Image (cartoon, rainbow, N blue to C red):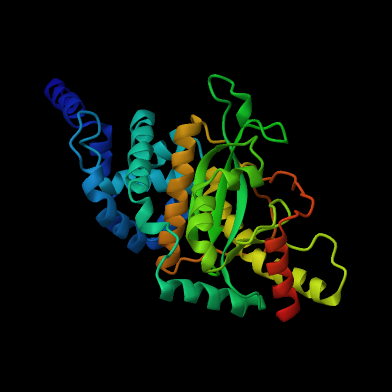
Amino acid sequence: MAISITILDCDLLLYGRGHRILDRCRLDDVTDEYLVSTYGFPRSFIDYLVELLGSSLSRPTQRSRAISPETQIMAALGFYTSGSFQTRMGDTIGISQASMSRCVTNVTEALVERVSQFIHFPREEGSIQRLKDGFYSLAGVPGVLGIVDCMHVTIKAPNAEDMSYVNQRGLHSLNCLFACDTQGVLLWAETHKPGSIQDNTLLNQSELCCLFETELHKEGWLLADHAFLLRPWLMTPVQIPGSSSEYRYNMAHSATHTVMERTQRALRLRFRCLDGSKATLQYSPEKASQIILACCILHNIALQHGLDIWTDSGGPGLEQEEECVHMEPVDSEAYRMRQEIILTF
């Protein structure tokens, strides 16, 4: 008996707890139903991620060499989709808290390395025209290339107690800027700005603003709600509609903007770690930003694989900031362009 115990202890030292449990966590040993209920995704999706991220997750390191890419991905997905504290998901998979933390970090970094592959604004003429056609078919608003909006994700208070992360509700958060197409695919995601920054200011400071100011303003415009200022490349609702045409424009604008609302709801439903009513991301702002971005990438990959989680139901979700309504601007060119849309379409 003493010999067998010595051998077991040596095995633990050599391979680690994760290696011992790995045989019981193989995808081939469990059903799709179990994978979806525990990790949020079916076998085919996890297989795709293993192929996509395997080279990054197999990098030889002293601490995580025994944990396969498959197990690392399952661990990270379980955390993203459940929002549970890492210890609980680690116990489910059979790895320690420290190993669970490394898995989440490794998978998050591997996904973020590939962000440009899955989240990007199309520049090709054909792709731009498809965006316009898709949005026009929704509610008749012409020239739309995407819908832009912001979403707050609550985080723990930074170690330095940086008050710039405190939003209007008194919570620490990151204010994330998103743009999406008619299918809810994210065309843009900036996830690193502090929660105290207002939506319009965040857009002003973004690379998305630079992109439309310098390139895409000739191709069309984005749609945004009252939290943003009207611009030649950003169409907002009429604050006080005074004609039937303006009322119809506002209705079409609202119907189109609903796509973004459903997209944000889909993100919160699928990735419970982003749902402030369930938990707060217990990480530094920098790491929390990467986790949010990784979830955005997975959202787009899921849509590519036909895994649509959109819902029209309400239910609990991440509380949003109070909308800051701006006065109508004096940008005559932007006003003229909006009036042309209202009167023509």
In the displayed structure image, the side of residue 303 where residue 313 appears, left or right? right
Give the answer, above or below, for where 48 lies relative to 255: above
Instruction: Decide which of 26, 207 is in the foreground and name it.
Output: 207
Identified at 45% across, 51% down, the residue is 38
Instruction: Decide which of 129, 174 is in the foreground and name it.
Output: 129
Instruction: Decide which of 127, 302 is in the foreground and name it.
Output: 127
Q: Is residue 137 visible?
A: yes
* Quarter of the rendering containing residue 64: top left
Image quadrant holding the C terminus, namely bottom right
In the displayed structure image, the side of residue 262 where residue 10 appears, left or right? left
User: Which percent across, then down, holds residue 245?
Assistant: 80, 76
Q: How many marks?
A: 0
Identified at 26% across, 46% down, the residue is 69
Task: Name the residue at the front extreme.
Answer: 332
* Quarter of the rendering containing residue 333: bottom right
Q: Is residue 185 visible?
A: no
In the displayed structure image, the side of residue 85 where residue 67 appears, left or right? left
Task: Name the residue at the right extreme.
Answer: 242
Image quadrant holding the N terminus, namely top left
Give the answer, above or below, for where 4 lies relative to 265: above
User: Which percent across, then down, holds residue 142?
Assistant: 62, 75
Give the answer, above or below, for where 163 lies relative to 43: above
Task: Name the residue at the left extreme.
Answer: 3
User: Which percent across, then down, holds residue 173?
Assistant: 60, 36
Identified at 59% across, 48% down, the residue is 203
Identified at 50% across, 46% down, the residue is 190
User: Which percent across, then down, holds residue 304?
Assistant: 41, 66
* Quarter of the rendering containing residue 242: bottom right
In the displayed structure image, the side of residue 311 where residue 10 appears, left or right? left
